Amino acid sequence: MVVTDIYESRTSGTAAIIARQEPVVYGNGDYADALSAEQVAAYERDGFLVLDSLFSEQEVTALMNEVLAMANNSKIAASDEAITEPGSNAVRSIFKVHALNKVIDKLSRDPRLIHVARQILGSEVYLHQSRANLKPGFKGKEFYWHSDFETWHTEDGMPAMRALSCSVLLTDNNECNGPLMVVPGSHRQFISCRGITPDENYKKSLKAQEYGVPDPLSLELLAEQGGIKAITGKAGSVVFFDCNTMHGSNGNISPWPRANVFMVYNSVENTLNAPKYGLAPRPEYIATRAFEGALEPLEALQEVA
Ligand code: AKG
């Protein structure tokens, strides 16, 4: 029997739009009770949900200090986990921040994040990836449109759309400093992309993506259907978004840095298979394969700090 991949992408074929097969909210959204029924319904409809001021100013200051300390640590800045901006030595992203830093590790287990992920994914969860995106003032470059699932499915062998990201805003994200932009409703369609993935694609793609980039026509269609929403908000707010929500952000030519820390939770029932097309697995700091079981939530951050 030939097993076909419904979410096939990056073949020699043309681009295609494929209807999502899986639910957005697993079970009845009652695996946990972090969100109201209205919030769950909004997430299911839009593919994202913003919780304003989920973290206090004091918590955000502590988290931001830790992220800056990592970015200014020459050993970390020179490590594989740190990705610099194209064309400069400014740190763009740091991966696996939960393993590099105790405060961020606690954040990854914070009940305010984990229970939302458990509720939406309808199961226990584990951390597939964590990263800080710094987007410094003047120098921070854009993140072109993409669906995370397209990459995680193709390059990491993630079987199904049963993962989500949360972006914890560590600075205010305003109209000018390159806030995250999402296409509401786009999570219901999978955009199969053109172009065969080269080996070690991550070495380039984390600076600027070339493969797994949706074609203009599909993007036009998605944006006609759902519009584009720039998610501005105060530091301490959190954006939860589905793994297949089309998103990206503009460069930051403002003087104001924009820093966000991302946690990606995957269902324990959706652990990784081999990557597609015989690609080598990406490093552990980008996609966890050393699955150690469900994440245990900690008490609120301020109580354990
Ligand atoms: C990514 O890191 O995959 C993103 O899409 C980040 C977008 C951003 O930080 O604005």
Image (cartoon, grey):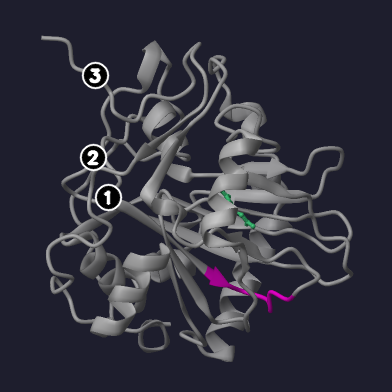
Q: Residue at x 62, y 37 (%)?
A: 217
Which structural element holds mark 3?
loop
Dot 1 amino acid type = Arg
Q: Residue at x 48, y 14 (%)?
A: 13
Q: Which residue is mark 1?
A: 162
Q: Is residue 287 left or right of residue 124?
A: right
Query: Is residue 173 found inside the magenta-colored segment of the image?
Result: yes
Dot 3 amino acid type = Thr
Name above or below for residue 63 compared with residue 193: below
What secondary structure predominates along the stretch shown in magenta?
loop
Q: Is residue 271 left or right of residue 168?
A: left
Dot 2 amino acid type = Thr
Q: Dividing the picture into quarters, in which one does residue 170 lie?
A: bottom right
Q: How much space separates mark 1 and mark 2, taking CA atoms?
A: 10 Å
Q: Earlier in the sequence, mark 1 or mark 3?
A: 3
Q: What range of the chain is rendered magenta? A: 168-174
Q: Is residue 88 left or right of residue 9?
A: right
Q: How much space separates mark 1 and mark 3, taking CA atoms?
A: 19 Å
Q: Which residue is mark 2?
A: 271
Query: Answer yes or no: do the residues labelled 1 and 3 have beta carbons within 8 Å?
Result: no
Q: Which residue is mark 3?
A: 4
Closer to the camera in the image, 297 or 222: 222
x, y percentage for residue 158? Answer: 31, 36
Closer to the camera in the image, 166 or 289: 166
Q: Earlier in the sequence, mark 1 or mark 2?
A: 1
Query: Answer yes or no: do the residues labelled 1 and 2 have beta carbons within 8 Å?
Result: no
Query: Is residue 297 found inside the magenta-colored segment of the image?
Result: no
Query: Answer yes or no: do the residues labelled 3 and 2 have beta carbons within 8 Å?
Result: no
Which structural element holds mark 1?
loop
Query: Pointer 3: residues within 10 angstroms few (<14), some, or many (20+)?
Result: few
